[in-house]
């Protein structure tokens, strides 16, 4: 059982492994490349978003770009899950669309909460480094927390969807505000997102030991990128909630 659905698809891929096998090192390098593409694209669209904001006094461009990039990312994820062989090309495009998303949503957070974006970036980097070191020292830990992480991830997804339905009907959702319950939920979600990184690393190790084909490195790199962006978004929301409560 894998908490990241993309990872699950990759590990259950029934392809015949007659070609060069994937490796942990190869997946690491491709993950770094995807993160680099995302970072560069994010900076570009962050700057563009702020320039548009200064000119129009509106978040319309950032909102539109974040919405379009979210939809495009979902389509690309489905494409890679259905056909992992396409992950080399789709993964590069996916990394760029994630960059558009990250840059666009960061504009709004940076405007309303001074310093939040830089803090979220630093905390996300620390989370990645910490989980890598922790997995290196205690690789068995990922297997022990796997089922719990999967259950919590599904519960968080279900709760978030419920909140969106409430919002569609104009009903306030207690976990979407800046009250103590919302703050606690944000802390929990951030912790689960970070824990998913541990499970992702373990999935890469399992996949490399299983001799999955070389193109799966791109697939797993894209999967790790999904989790890293999730951690960043949760860090933004957590820091924003803390800032709002501090201003009360």
Image (tube, rainbow, N blue to C red):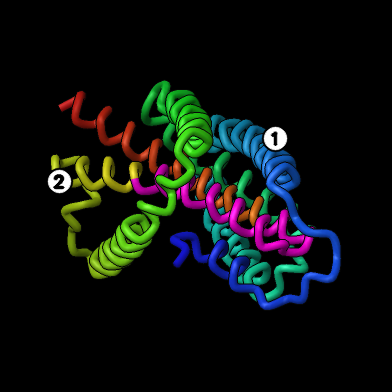
User: Would you say 168 lies left or right of 33 here?
Assistant: left
Q: Nearer the viewer, residue 121 or 32?
A: 32
Residue at left offset 52%, top offset 30%: 129
Disc 2 crowd, CA 10 A, few/some/many (<14, 14-19, 20+): few
Query: How far is disc 2 from disc 1 in space, using C-alphas?
Result: 35 Å
Quadrant in which the N terminus appears: bottom left
- The residue singled out by tag 2 in the image is 181
Q: Earlier in the sequence, mark 2 or mark 1?
A: 1
Residue at left offset 56%, top offset 32%: 50
Residue at left offset 84%, top offset 71%: 18
Chain part drawn in magenta: 192-219
Most common SS among magenta residues: helix
Q: Is residue 144 visible?
A: yes
Q: Is residue 41 visible?
A: no
Query: Which image quarter: residue 172?
Result: bottom left
Q: Where's residue 60, x and y in %?
A: 51, 48
Q: Where's residue 69, x and y in %?
A: 60, 56
- The residue singled out by tag 1 in the image is 40
């Amino acid at each position: 059982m894998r908490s990241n659905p993309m990872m699950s698809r990759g590990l259950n891929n029934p392809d015949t492994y007659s070609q060069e096998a994937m490796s942990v090192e190869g997946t690491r390098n491709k993950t770094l490349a995807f993160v680099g593409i995302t970072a560069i694209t994010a900076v570009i669209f962050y700057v563009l978003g702020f320039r548009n904001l200064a000119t129009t006094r509106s978040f319309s461009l950032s909102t539109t770009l974040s919405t379009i990039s979210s939809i495009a990312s979902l389509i690309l994820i489905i494409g890679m899950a259905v056909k992992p062989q396409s992950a080399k090309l789709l993964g590069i495009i996916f990394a760029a669309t994630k960059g558009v998303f990250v840059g666009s949503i960061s504009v709004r957070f940076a405007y309303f909460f001074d310093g939040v974006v830089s803090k979220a970036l630093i905390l996300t980097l620390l989370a990645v480094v910490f989980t890598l070191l922790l997995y290196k020292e205690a690789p068995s830990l990922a297997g022990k927390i796997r089922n719990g992480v999967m259950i919590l991830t599904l519960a968080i997804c279900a709760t978030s969807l419920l909140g969106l339905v409430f919002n569609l009907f104009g009903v306030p959702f207690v976990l979407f505000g800046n009250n103590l319950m919302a703050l606690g939920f944000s802390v929990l979600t951030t912790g689960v997102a970070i824990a998913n990184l541990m499970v992702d690393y373990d999935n890469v190790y399992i996949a490399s030991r299983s001799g999955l084909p070389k193109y799966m490195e791109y697939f797993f790199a894209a999967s790790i990128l999904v989790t890293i962006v999730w951690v960043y978004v949760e860090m933004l929301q957590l820091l924003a909630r803390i800032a709002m409560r501090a201003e009360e």
